[in-house]
Each structure stands twice: as structure tokens, then as C-alpha cells.
Amino acid sequence: MSETRWAVLPAGRAAGARTRGARIGDEVIVWSREAEQLEGEAEELDGEAEQLEGEAEELDGEAEQLDGEAEQLDGEAERAGEGTARSELSLVTQVGRAFQQAHPRIPVILDHGRHLVIDGGKTLRQKEDTCWRVEPLLPGVTVVDRPARHPGRVDPIAAGLVAAVSRPPYEADTTWLAQLPTRHSTSAGFGQAADRAAAALDALGYATSRFPVTVGGGRSANVIAEKAASPDVVVVTAHLDSVNIAGGPAAAAPGADDNGSGSAGVLLLARLLAGLSWEHTLRLILFGGEEQGLFGSKQYVASLSPDERSRIRAVLNMDMIASRNGPQSAVLLEGAAVSQSLIDDLAAAAATYTGLRVETSLNPFASDHVPFIQAGVPAVLTIEGNDSANHHIHSADDLLDHLDYELAMEILRMNVATLAGWLRPAPGPAPRPAGPVVSWAPGRLDVFVTGADHGLYHKAWTESSTTEFERLGGLPGGS
Ligand SMILES: [Zn+2]
């Protein structure tokens, strides 16, 4: 009978062990199970035993080496934990504390909120659940990374949009959404929320439409708004529905954070991005049926032709962006290999324009970015850091009182700066002189004008040179 020896080490000190361990945030878990498992298999399979034994010995050696490394590290740094598991280790990805609530007796070896390492869970790997997933813990993977901050060049248009991110309209939308008794996907409240969002998007000049969604025997809808430009499309999404899992469809479900916060985020980004011309088409989608199993996004993605899918450059999904679950404002960027460049762009924008602490994961789960990723479309989720510490979601207690609007503003600053890069400002009309301000200095002439995009532009002439118009920022969309 073999057991799994494991140790949790600080990631910074465990660089050498990382290839055989799994990194989760600031920690690396290393374990020795594989060698023992292979030995067991070798004993069973007499015919192929020699080869496997060879491999097992090799791995055994690695395991010993790993043990050695761990012991060595012990001297330098405290281990976060170590022990012996009774069975194979598994990786859990969960929404809230859904897995721990469903399986309170399964020992948790490493708790990183949305991600857990547990002792066992092999029989749960085949189970389908919308709120948790169990899979083998693989060596050499980074489940959650914490990339170093690399601030980039400040782009004037992105900086102008970042400066225009403002709390009052966002707070008003979140408040309106959360005062509905419920936005359960098939409820009257969901219909009211969809009507109000569609009217707001319509008033901003977007072409709006409804996409019918089937939720079991009931009906819901996606609200879609588009500002058409090139055939290439950038999609911004959030789910509009809320849920009270214990209370059922009629129970109170304010859904302030999940996902009033993301829905109001779509509306705020819609306001900011409506005021400028973009090279690529911008599409905003508020999904229904998310809480019942991603019905709105699954049915939407299924409706797209291969050509329509291939024209989507990026999908930015927001699900829970306004609850601060730790001492620092933090965000998790979650995607897959297909969305690695989107994650990199968001992390760079976070470092350039915000003070957010960023974690990343290529283990997509349980929100509307997943159906896009499964169809090969680059999609990424932006979600508040340490979301599993938010105990209020999916209940009558997901209230406005628990929101931290400044965290939402930070995530929206990161998102709008990134979207400006993905959408690319259209070359558009040259700045239009509207009440120009001119100043002279000896041998120099400076002109300041308001552009057609309501931004402030500057152009200068000297005796020997002339500058192009440079955008100095200003409020996109104006007022
Ligand atoms: Zn959600």
C-alpha cells in the first residue's frame, strides 16, 4: 500500500522543485506519488515489468532528489506544510466554497480559494457539477501564477479612457440591479434588467438585439449591443442573471457582486467606448442563464458560424469584480493557452494604469469565457482576487454593502485600457479646431484644440520643426 508524501514550499525558494511540483500562487506543492504508483503498476504487469521498473527506479531517484531538495529548503525556509496523504492528490477548481460545502470531509492540503489540492477525490473526477471540478494534479503545471509587474508605455488614448472611469454611473447601475428582488434567469426581474440595459445601450448609439436562451423548460435572453466597424470583433461580456441556490428561483437574489458588478461594468465600458471611433467592431453581451450552467453563452457560441467565430479577436468577460477579499486590491485573469496574449495584455495594463495585484490561471472554469475557449476563441475572465473568500454570493446576502467600488474601478481601468489596444483607435477625421488656444514664445507657436473625439490635442511649430497632433487626454464622449 503506497502513500503520497507531499510538501508545500514557498514558490520563490522552490524554483528547483517547480518542474516536478505544481505552482499555486505563492506556493509550490511537491509530492512523490508518481514513482510509487509506477512501482505498483510494474508489479502487476509482469510482462512489461522490466521497462516500467526501470522507469520507476528513475522516478524513484527523482522523488528522492525531490525529497532532498525539500529537506534542503526546509533549512532555508519554513514549509507552509507537509504530510502524507492516504491517496492520490487532486486539483479542485470551485466557485465560492462550493466544493468544500459539498464535501466537507475530504482533507484539503492546499487552500488557494478558487483552487484547492485535496487528498483523494479520484471518484469525483467524472462528476459534472456547475460549481466545482476535480481533476488529477499534474506535476510541472502552474495552476495559478503571479506575474511580475512590468509597466508599459502610457498610451494617451488609453490614459484618457482610464481617467474617465467614474464611480457614480457605475454605482447607480449596480444599485438599480441589486434592488430588483431577483434577476433569476427566467424571472420578471431578469426581464426588467434586460429591458433597462438594452435601453441604455440603445441610447448610447449601439445597435441592440435580443438572443433567446432556453433554460431547462424556461426562457431567458442575452442582450447584445454592437458598434460596427471592421469585420474583426472584440467582445465584452458579463452575465446579467443572479441566483439564490438554497432558496430557489423565487427567493431573494440581489446579486450585487455576482454579477451586478460585472453587468454594470459592461454598461460603464459601453459609455466610455461609445465616444471614440474604433478600427474593430465592438460587441457587448449580457448573458442570461449563466447560473444554471452557462446556457446563454453556450447557446450563443453554438449559434456562430466558423467564420463568425474566427473573426472574434478577443472576449473579455467580467464576473464578480467588486468584492475585495483581502488586504490588497487584486484580480485573477483566467483563460487558456489560446488566450495567453490577452492575459499578458491585461497584466501589462494593470501594471501601467492600476495598483492591482495580478494572478493568472490557464484553468478556465464556470463562467461565460469557457464556451468561447472550448470553441477555440481567445477569451479571458477578469474576477476579483481570492473570490472564494466571498461567502455572500448565490444567496440573499450578496448585497451592495459588501461591495468595494474602488476595486471595481481599478479592474475597469485595467479593462478599458486593454480594450483600447484590442479595438485600436480608428485613424478617423483629423482633429477639428473648436475654440483653439494658441500661444507664442520666441521662435515657437503652440496650438491646443478639441478633437472630433472630444480629446484635447496639441500641435507645435518652431523655426526648424513641426510636431504632429498629439492627444493630451480629455473625456472621451464629452458631455
Ligand atoms: Zn457569476
Image (cartoon, helix red, strand yellow):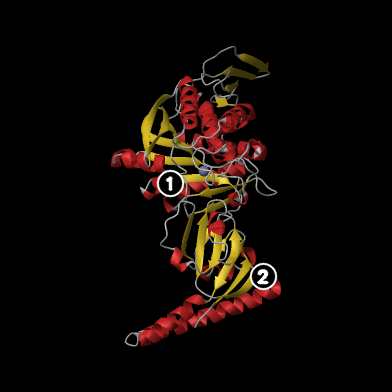
Residue 327 relative to residue 448: left or right:
right
Position of residue 230 measured from the top left corner of the image (x, y, whole percent): 37, 30
Residue marked by disc 1 = 293
Residue marked by disc 2 = 79
Front in this rendered view, residue 77 or 288: 288
- Label 2: which secondary element: loop
Q: Is residue 229 visible?
A: no
Front in this rendered view, residue 246 or 317: 246
Q: Is residue 92 visible?
A: yes
Q: Are marks 1 and 2 in contact (CB under 8 Å)?
A: no
Using a 10 Å C-alpha cutoff, classify the residue at mark 1 as few (fewer than 14 neighbours), some (14 to 19) or many (20 or more).
some
Position of residue 395 measured from the top left corner of the image (x, y, whole percent): 57, 43
**Disc nearest the viewer among 1 and 2:** 1
Q: Amino acid at mark 1?
A: Gly
Residue at x 39%, y 27% (from the top left corner): 209
Q: Amino acid at mark 2?
A: Arg
